[in-house]
């Protein structure tokens, strides 16, 4: 095989001598005829079979287009060759777990600069910088999506096949001006992500949940399940997690409600954070967890470790899928049961979505007060219905009333969050779970989002979280933890 320099020299010579053959003219139908060129030779027209005239590009524009295409192809070939040469020189080092990431980054950029400088035909500084960044992103990062992962304003990256990349910015979906080279390029990127945490994705296991080093959540689905090419969804999490002050500044929650929630966490209430996909449940869970005192032992249980707790005494557990032989699976339910033997003061479950709901209820009812978890639902009442359904998934032949009694006894507060049409996320309900009345669990709203204010001229929600004026019954339970709440917190908001 010829060297990189020889291949590039041949490409340069071919370009300079104009040896690139022009594309053949398109075939003409029997009724098509050229019209005479105009006086300035700027354009000519053809007629299609229906007699309609169509304007053809000038010869000058065709030549310019061909030159542009040749230059683009030359740069793409240069990028491919330098990329290949870089892999040959640094291949083993790229996967050396003992090599510091900063050292690896420096070595890659040094070799890359040497390879680009050795080219016989110079390239512009703009092209050199672009090639350097693209190749570095491919080798050290995640290819064309790497710039979006670095962009703090992008909250989600969605890859729908090699040619379609979408972003969520400020709560709105936008199509990105980028794409992967082909399906194999997408698969290499997915493999790079999942292999770093010991996960795999192939035809026998075509779906995978993973995470990036910064905690961002990753979901990948490959063919044959993904019909139009591999799908990759990355929900980013800020390196510096949001605080309660940030949520207040964003309008996600009111200051009074935030103070009330802090008291509820310190008062060891069992709390469920509910909401739809993308409503911000994990962010709210992270904020609630930050209120836990430093002297308590916290055990977190997640499918993909996302929570970013600042306390010192935290034990983080992560579920594990089955291996290629179908063995070794460790579920959320297994981890919840095991956590009871770890002397936890608090158990935090990233998301309850299956029979682990039964074990979570058992933990809340057996002295592990102050536990927090999230689940998907459309509202506080639906949260209880989903909890019942997931308990039944455990296969225990329990009567519905017994399940509801367990739920009413275990759960104290539901924090429901909603994502609005304008892209904002807001807490819409702080609802107390009371007792059973007949076969129904009684709920009482403490704070409710007021939708009556409507939307402004830009479509942004103008409502706010207001107090209903009702005092929750769990205040007595909070006093046993030496936490008291100012009665004025529950005073009804005045007219605004």
Image (cartoon, grey):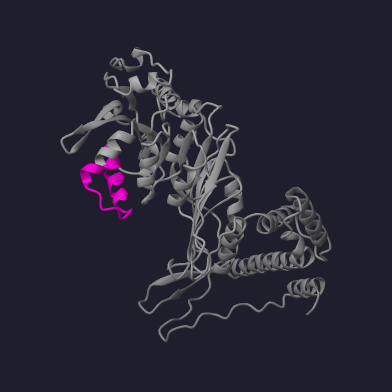
Q: Is residue 384 magenta?
A: yes
From the viewer's perspective, tell me whether residue 121 is left or right of residue 386.
right
Quarter of the view holding residue 73 = bottom right
What secondary structure is the magenta-colored segment mainly? helix
Residue 213 drawn above or below residue 265: below
What residue sits 52% from the left and 41% below the top?
Answer: 342
Q: Can residue 232 be spotted in the picture?
A: no
What residue sits 55% from the left and 38% below the top?
Answer: 308
What residue sits 49% from the left and 83% below the top?
Answer: 27
Depth check: 158 or 483 in front?
A: 483
Depth check: 277 or 337 in front?
A: 337
- Tell me where residue 414 appears, x and y as whole percent: 34, 34
In the image, the segment drawn in magenta is: 381-403
Q: Quadrant of the C terminus?
A: top left
Depth check: 311 or 447 in front?
A: 311
Q: Is residue 68 magenta?
A: no
Q: Quadrant of the N terminus?
A: bottom right
Depth check: 223 or 110 in front?
A: 223
From the viewer's perspective, tell me whether residue 484 is left or right of residue 236.
left
- Tell me where residue 443 appears, x and y as whole percent: 24, 31
């Amino acid at each position: 095989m010829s060297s990189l320099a020889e291949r590039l020299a041949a490409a340069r010579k071919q370009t300079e001598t104009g040896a690139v053959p022009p594309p053949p003219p398109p075939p003409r139908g029997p009724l098509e005829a050229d019209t005479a060129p105009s006086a300035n030779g700027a354009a000519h027209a053809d007629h299609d079979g229906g007699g309609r005239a169509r304007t053809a590009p000038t010869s000058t524009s065709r030549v310019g287009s061909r030159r542009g295409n040749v230059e683009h192809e030359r740069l793409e070939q240069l990028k491919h060759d330098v990329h290949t040469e870089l892999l040959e020189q640094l291949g083993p080092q790229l996967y050396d777990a003992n090599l510091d990431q900063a050292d690896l980054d420096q070595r890659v950029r040094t070799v890359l600069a040497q390879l680009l400088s050795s080219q016989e035909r110079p390239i512009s500084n703009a092209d050199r910088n672009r090639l350097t960044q693209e190749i570095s992103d491919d080798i050290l990062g995640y290819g064309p999506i790497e710039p979006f992962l670095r962009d703090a304003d992008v909250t989600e990256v969605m890859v729908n096949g090699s040619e379609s990349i979408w972003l969520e910015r400020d709560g709105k979906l936008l199509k990105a001006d980028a794409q992967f080279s082909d399906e194999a390029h997408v698969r290499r990127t997915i493999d790079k992500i999942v292999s770093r945490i010991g996960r795999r994705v192939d035809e026998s296991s075509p779906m995978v949940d993973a995470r990036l080093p910064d905690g961002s959540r990753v979901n990948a689905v490959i063919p044959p399940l993904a019909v139009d090419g591999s799908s990759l969804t990355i929900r980013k999490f800020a390196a510096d997690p949001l605080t309660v002050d940030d949520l207040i500044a964003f309008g996600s929650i009111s200051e009074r409600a935030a103070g009330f929630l802090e008291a509820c966490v310190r008062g060891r209430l069992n709390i469920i954070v509910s909401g739809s996909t993308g409503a911000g449940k994990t962010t709210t869970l992270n904020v609630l967890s930050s209120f836990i005192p430093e002297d308590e032992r916290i055990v977190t249980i997640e499918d993909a470790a996302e929570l970013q707790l600042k306390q010192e005494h935290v034990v983080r557990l992560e579920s594990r899928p089955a291996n290629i032989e179908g063995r070794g699976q460790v579920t959320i339910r297994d981890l919840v049961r095991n956590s009871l033997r770890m002397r936890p003061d608090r158990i935090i479950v990233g998301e309850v979505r299956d029979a682990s709901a039964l074990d979570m209820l058992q933990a809340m009812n057996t002295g592990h007060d102050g536990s927090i978890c999230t689940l998907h639902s459309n509202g506080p009442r639906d949260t209880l219905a989903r909890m019942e359904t997931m308990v039944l998934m455990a296969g225990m032949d329990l009567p519905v009333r017994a399940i509801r009694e367990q739920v009413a006894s275990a759960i104290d507060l539901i924090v429901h969050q909603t994502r609005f049409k304008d892209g904002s996320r807001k807490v819409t309900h702080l609802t107390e779970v009371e007792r059973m009345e007949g076969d129904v669990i009684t709920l009482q709203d403490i704070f409710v989002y007021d939708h009556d204010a409507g939307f402004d001229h830009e479509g942004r929600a103008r409502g706010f979280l207001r107090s209903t004026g009702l005092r929750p019954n769990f205040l007595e339970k909070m006093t046993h933890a030496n936490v008291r709440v100012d009665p004025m917190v529950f005073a009804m908001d005045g007219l605004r």
